[in-house]
Structure formats: structure tokens, C-alpha cells
Image: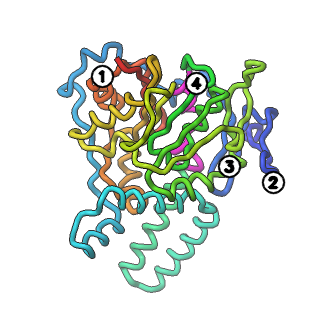
Amino acid sequence: MVTNSIWVSKDEKPFLEEHIGKTALLPSHRVDLRNFTEREYNKFVKMNRVKDWSSLSWKDVGKPLEVKKYSSDRKQYEESYGEEMKPFTSWQYFNKAFHEWFVKDVPNEMKEQKNQFFKSLKSFNPQQIKSALGDVAKIQLWNYAHRIQDGVWDPRGKRALFEGLDVTNPRLLFLGAAEGYEAMQLGAMYPGAHITMVDYDEYCRSTRFEEFPESYPFLGENPSTGQQKVYYKGDFIIDYIVNDIRNLPFGKEFDIVLSVGLLEHFPDDYKPEVMDWHRKFLKPGGYAILTTPRNQLRSRLYYNVMADVMNHTYRELMTVEQMGLYVYENGFDIKQHGFIKVHNGIVAQSR
């Protein structure tokens, strides 16, 4: 609705408390300071549908779907070197490919790709036409998934998944942080947080995080008034460490240990180790928060069309029930769980 749109200034912090309840569509992304209406919440958020995790079995829920269509970059690499791409290398390829899409001027890119497609028709070259049509499909899908639907960041949905934690001025550890979006959202919801981000690809710190827009607003709480407040990247206390998770020097000192899109990159034999990474750094009574991509038709379509951008590594799509069983069977009690537009989410505590 026009009444919900924001006129965006060029100031570094263009969004104020007066903009709460509104949204703006920018060239590369959407900003969203709205809260869900009851109708929208019921449409986009499904919470706590499993009453007793001990009663579920793998026979009931089935196994996750492995995404087997790999990117052309990975295929070319393996053909050139005659060996499977190592995990670290695959993450380097993925981070660069993914970030290049985050910084696109999407409307201009859509125009350019359409022009290239029409030019390709004049060539009468089937391969050139197919390639150009594929580029059109990718940018159109990215526009819908990230800018229009805001399914990648999904601030309203993730606030619903993360709300209700009993923490004050929390210490937060983000494993596999990339650009750090979800940690900053938690920092807005739980003011005074000290955030430690960890990724083992330097590109994530130097580019994905550094280039995350300073002007992007996070909706959170004002501890002085109990009302909502707008926060920015520069408002948070953040340490960014480039290291392998297995080499971190921390003990059980964090109130929240967070991972986003981490669990699904490991086959079943390694998932207990992934869950141990969360347990290892949690204070007694602390919260492990995990999200994974949902197994649904539009997600399967997305990872098929966007394979060259997304699929450099082992990847699964899960239901929240499948994800929850991994968490529960590896020693955690699930406090809340649910799914939003394209992600599952779980908040758990170590047993």
C-alpha cells in the first residue's frame, strides 16, 4: 500500500522511529519496519506445531532432500583439477557468488537482461538464446525472492522466530556469520548485546560484512521506554573473527549461540559435531538458535534455477520436523520452533 511506503533520504541513517510500520523497496533490497498484522502472522508464521519431540521418529518425518544440482563453477573446477572441490574452496566460491547478487541494482539488471535476451533472439543461436533466457529467469526470481518477498532476510518472520528469550545484555556468538544479518537483528531485539561473529572465509569479514549497508534499519526494543526503536549496524558492539569454528578459544560463556544455514551443509554423520559446536560455547541455560532453508516447492525451484549462485557445497532442504529431530536427538530441548517464508527456525537449550 502507498501509505506504507517510505521516502528514502540519502542520509546514513535515513529511517527514524516515525517510519516504524512502513516499508521501502530499494534497488538491491527491501527495508521493512512493519509488524505483522494478525492475519499476516497467521499466513507467514507457523509456530510450535510439534507438542512432544520424543514421540517423533525418522520413519514419521523422512529424511531431508539433498540438493544435487551443483553450480557450473564447481563442475568446471572439478573437471580442471580432477578432484572434488574442497569444502573451504566451495565456501569461497559461494560467498563471492552470493554477495555479487546482494549488491546488484536489480531493476537496472532486469532491464539489461531483457535487452540481452532480445538481442540473442536475433542470433538464431539456440545456446545463446537459452543462456540469455536463463539469465532473465535468475534475475526475475532473485527480484521476487529477495526484494519483493524479502524471503532471504525476512525481518518480520525472524523476529517471530527469535522473540521471547530470557536474556539481558547478552553475549552472542554467530557461527558461520557471513554478513551477520541475524545477529544484528537479535542485537536490536535484545539491546546491549555483545556480538561475536565467526567465519572462516576472510571475504565474509572484509566484503560481505563490511559492505552490508550502514543505512539498513533493524527494528528492535528501546530498553529505556519498552517501545520499538530503529537500530543500525553501527549501533552494535561487534567483534568479527576469521577462524575455523573448531579452533575457537571460547568456553561456555555465551547466552546465545546462533547459526543460520549451517546444519544443512553437513551429511548425517557430521550433524552431531555441528550440534556440539553450539553446546560447547553456551552458558548453562543459554539458547542455541538455528535456522535452515525449508523443503517446499518454491525453495526447490529457487535452488534449481539459482544453482550457479547457491549450490557450491553439500546442501539439504528440510522440514522443521526433520531439523528438530536432529536438534532433539543430539541433546537439546526445543523451546520454540516454527517456519516462516523460506526458513525453519529452532530455539533450544542443552539438556
Residue type pointed to by label 2:
Lys
Upstream in sequence: badge 3 or badge 1: 3
The crowding category of the residue bearing disc 3, from other C-alpha atoms within 10 Å (few below 14, some 14 to 19, many at least 20), is some
Instruction: Say which mark, if any, is on residue 25.
Output: 3
User: Could you tell me if residue 23 is visible in this image?
Assistant: no
Q: CA distance from mark 3 to mark 4?
A: 22 Å
- Labelled pair 3, 2 in contact (Cβ < 8 Å): no
Instruction: Say which mark, if any, is on residue 10.
Output: 2
Q: Which residue is mark 1?
A: 331
Residue type pointed to by label 3:
Leu
Upstream in sequence: badge 1 or badge 2: 2
Q: Give the residues drawn in magenta, as a range.
A: 146-163
Residue 230 covered by magenta stretch? no
Regarding mark 1 in the picture, which secondary structure is present there? loop
* Closer mark to the observer between disc 1 and disc 2: 1
Q: Residue at x 58, y 32 (%)?
A: 186
- Labelled pair 1, 4 in contact (Cβ < 8 Å): no
Instruction: Quadrant for the N terminus, please.
Output: top right
Residue 67: percent from left, percent from top: 29, 50
Q: Residue at x 69, y 25 (%)?
A: 221
Residue type pointed to by label 1:
Gly
Instruction: Say which mark, if any, is on residue 39.
Output: 4
Q: CA distance from mark 3 to mark 1?
A: 42 Å
Q: Residue at x 21, y 39 (%)?
A: 269
Predominant secondary structure, magenta span: helix
Instruction: Quadrant for the C terminus, please.
Output: top left
The crowding category of the residue bearing disc 2, from other C-alpha atoms within 10 Å (few below 14, some 14 to 19, many at least 20), is few
Task: Tell me the quarter of the picture where residue 82 sits.
Answer: bottom left
